[in-house]
Amino acid sequence: MELELIKTNEPILKIENLCKKYGKHLVLEDISFDVSKGEFLSLLGPSGCGKTTILRLLIGIDRATSGKIYKFGEDITNLAPKKRNIGIVFQNYSLFPNMNVYQNIAYALKSRKISAEEIDKKVKEIIDIVELNEHIYKKPINLSGGQQQRVAIARTLVLNPDIILFDEPMSALDAEIKVILRSQLKEIQKKLNITIIYVTHDQEEAFALSDRIMVLNDSKIMQLDTPYNLYHHPANEFVKSFIVNHLDMKVKSIEGSINGSKQVYEFLETRHSKNDQNLQT
């Protein structure tokens, strides 16, 4: 039996009865949850379930039809995006192609009243944290997808936001790079005690990264729980199908591939052995 997460402080973010309609189309229905300082919360669900809409409401680029958003106990539901101190990393990175790594990260600070010396210090500290020192003067076109993603993360981190939102940031990366970047992101999050809300449709990704996962479907929360509890105690048939059955199929597929590879290897070994015997006779 898994122990529940122990919360030692008030939630950094609290969402109450959030609803969103576009005309007559209901996109979010009665969404309520909270997020603790330093927590990694993933929003997981199929396309069109409302994951990205939640991010848009949290960052302030869209307004809720009803409901409230509180940060540190303050109602920020109708607060302008620039006053919320919430960062976001988009799927397409949105890097300036004419700027190198250093300039892309420093650009975010130039609109603030910070000295050139302080900007230089902050940028180099963040570049060191995301391990891009060897690429500091390269432009985005000369970086891999994973490196570009780290620049986008660094550009957000340098502003020292209270919360960072991620909108399917790894969907365009290949499988090997995803695994590496997941590990790096989790390491950065733990090191800096960052609060992250992360949108994904990838079950494995959510399980690899998250303290808790919110499973959404048809505009509603199906279950909000730890990865362990989602797998071992699914709240309904959708969660069981979307989480448990999917992960079990992946495991069986991997086991099948391993067994298949072993059978091929054994067949080839037997064949080589017979060939060697024939040669000897």
Image (cartoon, rainbow, N blue to C red):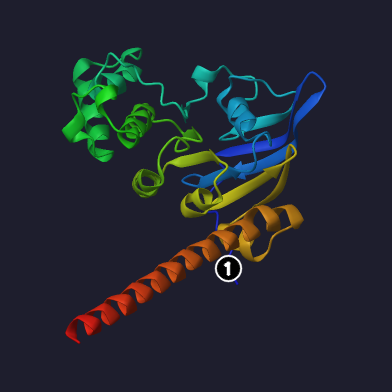
Residue topped by disc 1: 2
Secondary structure of the residue carrying tag 1 is loop
Q: Tell me the kind of residue under disc 1.
A: Glu
Q: Position of residue 185 (x, y in %)?
A: 38, 44
Q: Provide residue 68's location: percent of width, then percent of height.
A: 69, 30
Q: Write down the quadrant of residue 62 in the picture.
A: top right
Residue 196 location in percent, x, y? 48, 40
Q: Residue furthest front?
A: 281
Front-most of residues 197 and 135: 135
Determine whether 249 is above or below 164 in the image: below
The residue at the point 66 percent across, 43 percent down is: 33
Q: Taking 79 as reference, is 260 above or below it? A: below
Residue that extends furthest to the right in the rendered view of this protein = 24
Can residue 57 be seen here? The reply is: yes
Which quarter of the image is occupied by the N terminus? bottom right
Q: Is residue 74 left or right of residue 132?
A: right
Label 1: how many residues lie within 10 Å, few (<14), some (14-19) or many (20+)? few
**Which residue is at a point 67% across and 20% down the rendered structure image?**
63
Count of picture labels: 1
